[in-house]
């Protein structure tokens, strides 16, 4: 099994009900989704993510990758927010 990161935008179950009434999906009904799954294939990870939507539906389909957004940003060398980085302490010599 491998770890897959599933990310995308989805419309909640309530948003779908509202869309049926008014005929279109509003921007306020769209929510972000990002979660990691242990799966054998990327397709299996998408199936598990779709089940976690609890009646919602993907807007453009999910994106599956083996690296998280945090790992991608660190690899690019993007700046970090102050206070969130881990400080390494220098060892004292005797």
Image: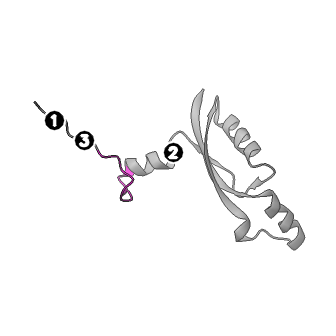
Image coords of residue 9 (percent x, y): 66, 57
Residue 34 point in image, percent of width and height = 61, 49
Residue at x 57%, y 30% (from the top left corner): 2
Q: With respect to residue 12, does 54 lie above or below?
A: above
* Mark nearer the N terminus (3 vs 2): 2
Of all residues, the one furthest to the bottom in this rendering is 22
Left or right: residue 63 versus residue 28 is left
Tell me where the magenta segment starts and ends, as one range.
76-87
Which numbered marker is on residue 92? Answer: 1
Q: Does residue 84 show up magenta in the picture?
A: yes
The secondary element bearing badge 3 is classed as: loop
> Which residue is under mark 2?
68
Task: Name the residue: 81% across, 57% down.
Answer: 13
Kindly report the distance in space between the C-alpha atoms of the residues bearing marks 1 and 2. Answer: 35 Å
For marks 1 and 2, the one nearer the N-term is 2
**Closer to us: mark 3 or mark 2?**
3
């Amino acid at each position: 099994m491998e770890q897959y990161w599933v990310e995308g935008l989805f419309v909640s179950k309530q948003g779908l009900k509202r869309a049926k009434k008014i005929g279109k999906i509003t921007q306020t009904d769209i929510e972000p989704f990002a979660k990691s799954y242990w799966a054998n294939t990327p397709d299996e990870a998408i199936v598990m993510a779709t089940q976690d939507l609890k009646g919602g539906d993907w807007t453009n389909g999910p994106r599956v990758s083996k690296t998280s957004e945090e790992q991608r940003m660190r690899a690019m060398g993007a700046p970090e927010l102050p206070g969130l980085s881990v400080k390494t302490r220098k060892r004292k010599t005797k």
